[in-house]
Image (cartoon, rainbow, N blue to C red):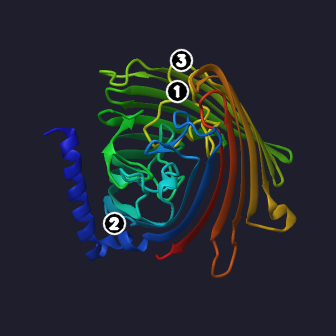
Amino acid sequence: MTARNIIPLALLGSTALALVLPTATHAAGFVEDAKVTLGLRNYYFNRNYLNGTDPMIGPATNRERQGQAEGWTQSFILDARSGYTQGTVGFGLDVLGLYSIKLDGNRGAANTQLLPIHDDGQAADQFGRTAVAAKAKLSKTELKVGEWFAVLPILRADDGRSLPQTFQGAQLTSNEIDGLTLYGGQFWKNSQRHDASREEMSFGGVEGDDFNFAGGEYRFNGNNTMVGVWHARLENVYQQSYVQLTHSQPVGDWVLGANLGYVTGKEEGSAKAGNLDNKVYQGAFTAKTGNNTFTVAYQRLSGDTKFMRIDGASGGTLVNDGFTNSYDNPEERSWQIRHDYNFAGLGIPGLTMMNRYVSGDNATLGGRTNAEEWGRESELAYTIQEGSLKNLSVRWRNSDVRRDGNAQDIHENRLIINYPLSIL
Protein backbone atom coordinates (compact mmCIF):
# COMPACT_ATOMS: atom_id res chain seq x y z
CA MET A 1 0.00 0.00 0.00
CA THR A 2 1.43 3.40 -1.01
CA ALA A 3 1.74 6.43 1.23
CA ARG A 4 -0.96 8.15 -0.79
CA ASN A 5 -3.38 5.30 -0.08
CA ILE A 6 -2.52 5.29 3.59
CA ILE A 7 -3.28 8.99 4.07
CA PRO A 8 -7.01 8.79 3.12
CA LEU A 9 -7.38 5.83 5.50
CA ALA A 10 -5.75 7.87 8.23
CA LEU A 11 -8.22 10.64 7.50
CA LEU A 12 -11.18 8.30 7.88
CA GLY A 13 -9.79 6.86 11.08
CA SER A 14 -8.98 10.25 12.61
CA THR A 15 -12.37 11.62 11.59
CA ALA A 16 -14.22 8.72 13.12
CA LEU A 17 -12.19 8.97 16.31
CA ALA A 18 -12.77 12.70 16.55
CA LEU A 19 -16.52 12.21 16.16
CA VAL A 20 -16.62 9.59 18.89
CA LEU A 21 -14.30 11.16 21.45
CA PRO A 22 -16.38 14.28 22.23
CA THR A 23 -18.79 12.03 24.18
CA ALA A 24 -16.02 11.17 26.61
CA THR A 25 -15.24 13.31 29.63
CA HIS A 26 -11.56 13.66 28.67
CA ALA A 27 -12.54 15.29 25.38
CA ALA A 28 -13.83 18.53 26.85
CA GLY A 29 -11.42 20.66 24.85
CA PHE A 30 -12.92 19.42 21.59
CA VAL A 31 -16.12 21.37 22.28
CA GLU A 32 -14.96 24.04 24.73
CA ASP A 33 -12.31 25.37 22.34
CA ALA A 34 -14.49 25.07 19.24
CA LYS A 35 -15.27 28.09 17.10
CA VAL A 36 -18.08 28.26 14.55
CA THR A 37 -18.80 31.25 12.32
CA LEU A 38 -21.17 31.77 9.39
CA GLY A 39 -19.88 34.27 6.88
CA LEU A 40 -22.44 36.03 4.69
CA ARG A 41 -20.75 37.37 1.55
CA ASN A 42 -22.54 39.46 -1.04
CA TYR A 43 -20.37 40.03 -4.12
CA TYR A 44 -21.04 42.25 -7.14
CA PHE A 45 -18.51 42.21 -9.99
CA ASN A 46 -18.45 44.31 -13.17
CA ARG A 47 -15.58 44.30 -15.67
CA ASN A 48 -15.58 46.19 -18.97
CA TYR A 49 -13.28 45.03 -21.78
CA LEU A 50 -11.98 47.96 -23.79
CA ASN A 51 -10.22 46.41 -26.81
CA GLY A 52 -12.93 46.64 -29.42
CA THR A 53 -15.06 43.79 -30.75
CA ASP A 54 -12.61 41.26 -32.16
CA PRO A 55 -13.20 37.90 -30.36
CA MET A 56 -9.63 36.91 -31.19
CA ILE A 57 -8.20 39.49 -28.77
CA GLY A 58 -10.70 39.38 -25.94
CA PRO A 59 -13.02 37.12 -23.94
CA ALA A 60 -15.74 35.48 -25.94
CA THR A 61 -18.72 33.21 -25.26
CA ASN A 62 -19.94 30.97 -28.09
CA ARG A 63 -17.56 32.90 -30.38
CA GLU A 64 -19.35 36.17 -29.65
CA ARG A 65 -17.21 39.02 -28.36
CA GLN A 66 -17.79 39.67 -24.66
CA GLY A 67 -17.60 43.38 -23.97
CA GLN A 68 -18.49 43.05 -20.31
CA ALA A 69 -18.38 40.49 -17.52
CA GLU A 70 -20.93 41.03 -14.78
CA GLY A 71 -22.28 38.95 -11.92
CA TRP A 72 -23.82 39.15 -8.47
CA THR A 73 -23.89 36.40 -5.85
CA GLN A 74 -24.87 35.72 -2.27
CA SER A 75 -22.59 33.25 -0.51
CA PHE A 76 -22.68 31.40 2.79
CA ILE A 77 -19.38 30.26 4.32
CA LEU A 78 -19.66 28.06 7.41
CA ASP A 79 -16.32 27.72 9.19
CA ALA A 80 -16.46 25.21 12.07
CA ARG A 81 -13.22 24.41 13.90
CA SER A 82 -13.13 22.13 16.91
CA GLY A 83 -10.63 22.28 19.70
CA TYR A 84 -8.50 19.25 20.58
CA THR A 85 -9.42 16.34 22.78
CA GLN A 86 -7.40 16.09 25.96
CA GLY A 87 -4.54 13.65 26.30
CA THR A 88 -1.03 13.17 24.98
CA VAL A 89 -2.36 13.31 21.41
CA GLY A 90 -5.31 15.62 20.83
CA PHE A 91 -7.73 15.07 17.97
CA GLY A 92 -9.98 17.54 16.22
CA LEU A 93 -12.07 18.25 13.16
CA ASP A 94 -12.47 21.29 10.88
CA VAL A 95 -15.42 21.68 8.52
CA LEU A 96 -15.83 24.33 5.83
CA GLY A 97 -19.29 24.48 4.27
CA LEU A 98 -19.42 26.58 1.08
CA TYR A 99 -22.56 27.56 -0.84
CA SER A 100 -23.23 30.38 -3.32
CA ILE A 101 -26.41 31.50 -5.10
CA LYS A 102 -26.59 33.54 -8.30
CA LEU A 103 -28.53 36.76 -7.89
CA ASP A 104 -27.70 38.02 -11.38
CA GLY A 105 -25.43 37.10 -14.28
CA ASN A 106 -25.88 34.94 -17.38
CA ARG A 107 -23.58 34.85 -20.38
CA GLY A 108 -22.00 38.09 -19.18
CA ALA A 109 -20.77 36.26 -16.07
CA ALA A 110 -18.51 33.95 -18.05
CA ASN A 111 -15.35 35.77 -17.01
CA THR A 112 -16.26 37.01 -13.53
CA GLN A 113 -15.18 33.70 -11.94
CA LEU A 114 -17.98 34.15 -9.41
CA LEU A 115 -19.78 31.01 -10.61
CA PRO A 116 -19.17 27.87 -12.67
CA ILE A 117 -20.04 28.25 -16.36
CA HIS A 118 -22.05 25.61 -18.23
CA ASP A 119 -21.15 24.42 -21.75
CA ASP A 120 -23.77 26.78 -23.25
CA GLY A 121 -22.02 29.77 -21.67
CA GLN A 122 -24.62 30.29 -18.95
CA ALA A 123 -23.62 30.81 -15.35
CA ALA A 124 -24.74 28.18 -12.84
CA ASP A 125 -27.64 29.15 -10.57
CA GLN A 126 -25.81 27.84 -7.52
CA PHE A 127 -22.78 25.84 -6.48
CA GLY A 128 -20.95 24.75 -3.38
CA ARG A 129 -18.95 22.06 -1.67
CA THR A 130 -17.95 20.82 1.76
CA ALA A 131 -14.35 20.60 2.90
CA VAL A 132 -13.53 18.41 5.91
CA ALA A 133 -10.15 18.05 7.59
CA ALA A 134 -9.15 15.89 10.55
CA LYS A 135 -6.33 17.11 12.76
CA ALA A 136 -4.12 15.64 15.46
CA LYS A 137 -1.78 17.51 17.80
CA LEU A 138 1.19 16.23 19.78
CA SER A 139 3.00 18.86 21.85
CA LYS A 140 3.43 21.79 19.41
CA THR A 141 3.21 19.69 16.24
CA GLU A 142 -0.01 19.36 14.24
CA LEU A 143 -0.97 16.95 11.46
CA LYS A 144 -3.89 17.97 9.28
CA VAL A 145 -5.42 15.66 6.66
CA GLY A 146 -8.35 16.46 4.40
CA GLU A 147 -9.43 19.59 2.56
CA TRP A 148 -9.11 23.19 3.67
CA PHE A 149 -8.26 26.77 2.71
CA ALA A 150 -4.48 26.47 2.69
CA VAL A 151 -2.32 29.61 2.60
CA LEU A 152 1.44 29.05 2.34
CA PRO A 153 4.10 31.26 0.71
CA ILE A 154 4.64 28.54 -1.90
CA LEU A 155 0.90 27.81 -2.42
CA ARG A 156 -1.80 30.36 -1.65
CA ALA A 157 -5.47 29.47 -1.98
CA ASP A 158 -7.43 32.30 -3.61
CA ASP A 159 -10.34 33.94 -1.79
CA GLY A 160 -11.05 36.74 -4.23
CA ARG A 161 -14.55 35.82 -5.41
CA SER A 162 -17.77 34.23 -4.10
CA LEU A 163 -16.16 31.22 -2.41
CA PRO A 164 -12.57 30.42 -1.45
CA GLN A 165 -10.36 27.93 -3.23
CA THR A 166 -9.49 24.80 -1.23
CA PHE A 167 -6.88 22.05 -1.54
CA GLN A 168 -7.11 18.42 -0.50
CA GLY A 169 -4.04 16.90 1.08
CA ALA A 170 -1.98 16.51 4.25
CA GLN A 171 0.21 18.99 6.12
CA LEU A 172 2.52 18.74 9.12
CA THR A 173 3.27 21.95 11.05
CA SER A 174 5.76 22.03 13.92
CA ASN A 175 6.59 24.79 16.43
CA GLU A 176 8.75 22.79 18.84
CA ILE A 177 11.63 25.29 18.68
CA ASP A 178 10.88 28.86 19.77
CA GLY A 179 10.72 31.17 16.77
CA LEU A 180 11.00 28.33 14.23
CA THR A 181 8.02 26.92 12.33
CA LEU A 182 8.57 23.94 10.04
CA TYR A 183 6.14 22.80 7.34
CA GLY A 184 5.87 19.76 5.13
CA GLY A 185 3.14 18.00 3.21
CA GLN A 186 1.40 17.02 0.04
CA PHE A 187 -1.69 18.20 -1.82
CA TRP A 188 -3.36 16.11 -4.48
CA LYS A 189 -6.67 17.82 -5.35
CA ASN A 190 -7.63 21.39 -6.20
CA SER A 191 -11.09 23.00 -5.90
CA GLN A 192 -10.86 26.40 -7.57
CA ARG A 193 -12.83 29.39 -6.35
CA HIS A 194 -15.49 29.13 -9.10
CA ASP A 195 -15.81 25.33 -9.22
CA ALA A 196 -17.55 22.69 -7.11
CA SER A 197 -15.41 19.83 -8.39
CA ARG A 198 -12.04 18.54 -7.21
CA GLU A 199 -9.47 18.42 -9.99
CA GLU A 200 -5.87 17.30 -10.24
CA MET A 201 -3.20 19.83 -9.32
CA SER A 202 -2.13 21.58 -12.52
CA PHE A 203 -0.12 24.45 -13.98
CA GLY A 204 -1.25 26.21 -17.16
CA GLY A 205 -3.86 23.49 -17.70
CA VAL A 206 -1.22 20.74 -17.59
CA GLU A 207 -2.05 18.19 -14.90
CA GLY A 208 0.76 17.01 -12.69
CA ASP A 209 0.92 14.41 -10.00
CA ASP A 210 0.99 15.36 -6.32
CA PHE A 211 2.14 18.78 -5.11
CA ASN A 212 4.83 18.18 -2.48
CA PHE A 213 6.26 20.96 -0.33
CA ALA A 214 8.53 21.70 2.62
CA GLY A 215 9.56 24.92 4.26
CA GLY A 216 10.57 26.76 7.37
CA GLU A 217 10.23 30.24 8.83
CA TYR A 218 12.42 31.58 11.64
CA ARG A 219 11.38 34.71 13.55
CA PHE A 220 13.80 36.54 15.81
CA ASN A 221 14.76 40.03 16.94
CA GLY A 222 11.54 40.33 18.93
CA ASN A 223 9.60 38.93 15.94
CA ASN A 224 10.69 41.94 13.91
CA THR A 225 12.74 39.80 11.51
CA MET A 226 11.74 36.66 9.62
CA VAL A 227 13.69 34.39 7.28
CA GLY A 228 11.76 31.85 5.22
CA VAL A 229 12.96 29.05 2.94
CA TRP A 230 10.56 26.94 0.82
CA HIS A 231 10.67 24.28 -1.86
CA ALA A 232 7.79 22.72 -3.80
CA ARG A 233 7.30 20.26 -6.63
CA LEU A 234 4.29 19.70 -8.83
CA GLU A 235 5.51 16.25 -9.76
CA ASN A 236 6.38 15.87 -13.46
CA VAL A 237 5.58 19.52 -14.19
CA TYR A 238 7.62 22.07 -12.21
CA GLN A 239 9.78 22.62 -9.15
CA GLN A 240 10.12 25.92 -7.34
CA SER A 241 12.18 27.38 -4.48
CA TYR A 242 11.52 30.58 -2.55
CA VAL A 243 13.68 32.52 -0.09
CA GLN A 244 12.18 35.44 1.83
CA LEU A 245 13.42 38.02 4.32
CA THR A 246 11.10 40.43 6.14
CA HIS A 247 12.05 43.07 8.70
CA SER A 248 10.23 45.78 10.66
CA GLN A 249 12.13 48.60 12.37
CA PRO A 250 10.72 51.44 14.52
CA VAL A 251 12.52 54.73 13.88
CA GLY A 252 11.13 57.55 15.98
CA ASP A 253 7.50 58.14 14.97
CA TRP A 254 7.94 55.87 11.93
CA VAL A 255 7.91 52.11 11.43
CA LEU A 256 9.97 51.02 8.43
CA GLY A 257 9.49 47.63 6.81
CA ALA A 258 11.10 45.49 4.12
CA ASN A 259 9.98 42.34 2.30
CA LEU A 260 12.69 40.83 0.08
CA GLY A 261 12.28 37.66 -1.96
CA TYR A 262 13.88 35.44 -4.57
CA VAL A 263 12.03 32.69 -6.46
CA THR A 264 13.48 30.21 -8.93
CA GLY A 265 11.61 27.57 -10.89
CA LYS A 266 12.16 25.02 -13.63
CA GLU A 267 10.69 21.82 -15.08
CA GLU A 268 10.48 18.66 -12.98
CA GLY A 269 10.46 14.93 -13.73
CA SER A 270 8.94 14.11 -17.11
CA ALA A 271 8.32 17.85 -17.76
CA LYS A 272 4.72 17.55 -18.98
CA ALA A 273 4.60 21.32 -19.55
CA GLY A 274 7.92 21.34 -21.41
CA ASN A 275 11.11 23.10 -20.42
CA LEU A 276 10.43 25.82 -17.85
CA ASP A 277 12.64 28.64 -16.65
CA ASN A 278 11.60 31.42 -14.29
CA LYS A 279 13.31 33.60 -11.69
CA VAL A 280 11.83 36.43 -9.63
CA TYR A 281 13.75 39.11 -7.73
CA GLN A 282 11.57 41.39 -5.66
CA GLY A 283 11.43 43.85 -2.81
CA ALA A 284 8.75 45.93 -1.08
CA PHE A 285 9.54 48.74 1.34
CA THR A 286 7.02 50.38 3.66
CA ALA A 287 7.05 53.45 5.88
CA LYS A 288 4.24 53.94 8.39
CA THR A 289 3.59 57.00 10.49
CA GLY A 290 0.37 57.81 12.28
CA ASN A 291 -2.50 56.75 10.03
CA ASN A 292 -0.49 56.76 6.80
CA THR A 293 1.43 53.88 5.23
CA PHE A 294 3.57 54.43 2.14
CA THR A 295 4.87 51.54 0.01
CA VAL A 296 7.24 51.25 -2.94
CA ALA A 297 7.95 47.87 -4.57
CA TYR A 298 10.01 46.43 -7.42
CA GLN A 299 9.55 43.04 -9.08
CA ARG A 300 11.79 41.55 -11.79
CA LEU A 301 11.15 38.31 -13.70
CA SER A 302 13.70 36.58 -15.90
CA GLY A 303 13.56 33.43 -18.01
CA ASP A 304 11.18 32.18 -20.69
CA THR A 305 8.31 31.25 -18.36
CA LYS A 306 5.83 33.34 -16.39
CA PHE A 307 5.62 32.97 -12.61
CA MET A 308 4.74 29.37 -11.71
CA ARG A 309 1.74 28.73 -9.49
CA ILE A 310 -0.96 26.10 -9.24
CA ASP A 311 -3.96 26.92 -11.46
CA GLY A 312 -6.40 29.19 -9.68
CA ALA A 313 -4.04 29.94 -6.80
CA SER A 314 -3.37 33.48 -5.62
CA GLY A 315 -0.31 35.35 -6.78
CA GLY A 316 0.08 36.97 -3.38
CA THR A 317 3.67 35.78 -3.06
CA LEU A 318 4.57 38.48 -5.61
CA VAL A 319 4.92 42.00 -4.21
CA ASN A 320 3.12 43.53 -7.22
CA ASP A 321 0.17 41.16 -7.23
CA GLY A 322 -3.13 43.06 -7.12
CA PHE A 323 -6.88 42.67 -7.61
CA THR A 324 -6.67 42.51 -11.40
CA ASN A 325 -3.07 41.77 -12.42
CA SER A 326 0.16 40.18 -11.14
CA TYR A 327 2.74 41.60 -13.60
CA ASP A 328 4.20 38.10 -13.81
CA ASN A 329 4.89 37.72 -17.53
CA PRO A 330 8.24 36.44 -18.85
CA GLU A 331 11.04 39.00 -18.46
CA GLU A 332 8.69 41.61 -16.99
CA ARG A 333 9.97 44.40 -14.75
CA SER A 334 7.43 46.27 -12.62
CA TRP A 335 7.39 48.84 -9.87
CA GLN A 336 4.63 50.00 -7.53
CA ILE A 337 3.80 53.03 -5.45
CA ARG A 338 1.03 52.70 -2.84
CA HIS A 339 -0.63 54.73 -0.08
CA ASP A 340 -2.91 53.42 2.70
CA TYR A 341 -4.84 55.69 5.04
CA ASN A 342 -6.78 54.85 8.21
CA PHE A 343 -9.53 57.40 8.86
CA ALA A 344 -9.42 56.69 12.58
CA GLY A 345 -7.10 59.68 12.62
CA LEU A 346 -10.06 61.81 11.52
CA GLY A 347 -12.41 60.27 14.06
CA ILE A 348 -13.89 57.61 11.75
CA PRO A 349 -12.59 54.25 13.04
CA GLY A 350 -13.19 51.34 10.67
CA LEU A 351 -12.85 53.41 7.48
CA THR A 352 -9.75 52.84 5.34
CA MET A 353 -8.59 53.73 1.84
CA MET A 354 -5.88 52.25 -0.39
CA ASN A 355 -4.56 53.58 -3.71
CA ARG A 356 -1.75 52.04 -5.77
CA TYR A 357 -0.21 52.37 -9.20
CA VAL A 358 1.87 49.66 -10.86
CA SER A 359 3.82 49.97 -14.10
CA GLY A 360 5.42 47.07 -15.97
CA ASP A 361 7.69 46.91 -19.01
CA ASN A 362 10.02 44.57 -20.95
CA ALA A 363 7.30 41.89 -20.83
CA THR A 364 6.43 39.15 -23.29
CA LEU A 365 2.75 40.04 -23.48
CA GLY A 366 -0.08 40.20 -26.01
CA GLY A 367 1.98 38.76 -28.83
CA ARG A 368 4.80 41.22 -28.26
CA THR A 369 8.18 41.33 -26.62
CA ASN A 370 9.30 44.38 -24.69
CA ALA A 371 5.62 45.16 -24.04
CA GLU A 372 4.35 47.60 -21.42
CA GLU A 373 1.35 47.61 -19.09
CA TRP A 374 0.11 49.63 -16.14
CA GLY A 375 -2.62 49.39 -13.55
CA ARG A 376 -4.35 51.59 -10.99
CA GLU A 377 -6.31 50.13 -8.08
CA SER A 378 -8.28 51.71 -5.26
CA GLU A 379 -10.17 50.26 -2.31
CA LEU A 380 -12.48 52.09 0.08
CA ALA A 381 -13.52 49.89 3.01
CA TYR A 382 -15.62 50.37 6.13
CA THR A 383 -16.15 47.95 9.01
CA ILE A 384 -18.88 48.67 11.56
CA GLN A 385 -17.27 48.90 14.98
CA GLU A 386 -20.18 48.31 17.37
CA GLY A 387 -23.86 47.48 17.64
CA SER A 388 -25.89 44.59 16.25
CA LEU A 389 -24.06 44.78 12.90
CA LYS A 390 -20.59 44.89 14.43
CA ASN A 391 -17.88 43.52 12.08
CA LEU A 392 -20.04 43.91 8.96
CA SER A 393 -17.69 45.25 6.28
CA VAL A 394 -18.30 46.94 2.93
CA ARG A 395 -15.54 47.17 0.30
CA TRP A 396 -15.57 49.01 -3.00
CA ARG A 397 -12.73 48.17 -5.37
CA ASN A 398 -12.10 50.17 -8.53
CA SER A 399 -9.39 49.20 -11.05
CA ASP A 400 -8.01 50.02 -14.47
CA VAL A 401 -5.44 48.03 -16.48
CA ARG A 402 -3.93 49.01 -19.84
CA ARG A 403 -1.65 46.76 -21.87
CA ASP A 404 0.22 46.69 -25.18
CA GLY A 405 -0.64 44.48 -28.13
CA ASN A 406 -3.54 42.03 -28.04
CA ALA A 407 -3.57 41.80 -24.24
CA GLN A 408 -6.85 42.88 -22.68
CA ASP A 409 -7.52 46.36 -21.32
CA ILE A 410 -10.09 46.46 -18.54
CA HIS A 411 -12.04 48.78 -16.27
CA GLU A 412 -13.50 47.11 -13.22
CA ASN A 413 -15.67 47.70 -10.15
CA ARG A 414 -16.42 45.34 -7.27
CA LEU A 415 -18.70 45.77 -4.27
CA ILE A 416 -18.18 43.21 -1.50
CA ILE A 417 -20.23 42.98 1.69
CA ASN A 418 -19.11 40.55 4.40
CA TYR A 419 -20.96 39.81 7.62
CA PRO A 420 -19.44 37.20 9.95
CA LEU A 421 -21.93 35.72 12.43
CA SER A 422 -20.39 34.04 15.48
CA ILE A 423 -22.38 30.90 16.25
CA LEU A 424 -20.07 29.32 18.83
Q: Which residue is mark 2?
A: 86
Tell which circle, 1 or 2, labels the residue nearer the N-terminal end: 2
Image coordinates of residue 344 in percent, x first then y, are 80, 64
Q: Looking at the picture, which amino acid does disc 3 mark?
A: Gly
Mark 1 is on which residue type? Lys
Quick one: 312 or 7, which is closer to the camera? Answer: 312
x, y percent for residue 256? 77, 40
Query: Mark on residue 303?
Result: 3
Image position of 79 with respect to 264: above or below: below
In the image shown, does 5 or 228 lie closer to the viewer?
Answer: 5
Dots 3, 1 in contact, CB < 8 A: no
Task: From the top left corner, tell me how far across and down residue 259 is, in percent.
Answer: 66, 35
Establish if 97 lies above or below 48: below
- Quarter of the image holding residue 404? top right
Q: Is residue 356 above or below residue 386?
A: above
**Badge 3: how crowded within 10 Å, few (<14), some, or many (20+)?**
some
Q: Residue at x 31, y 36 (%)?
A: 210
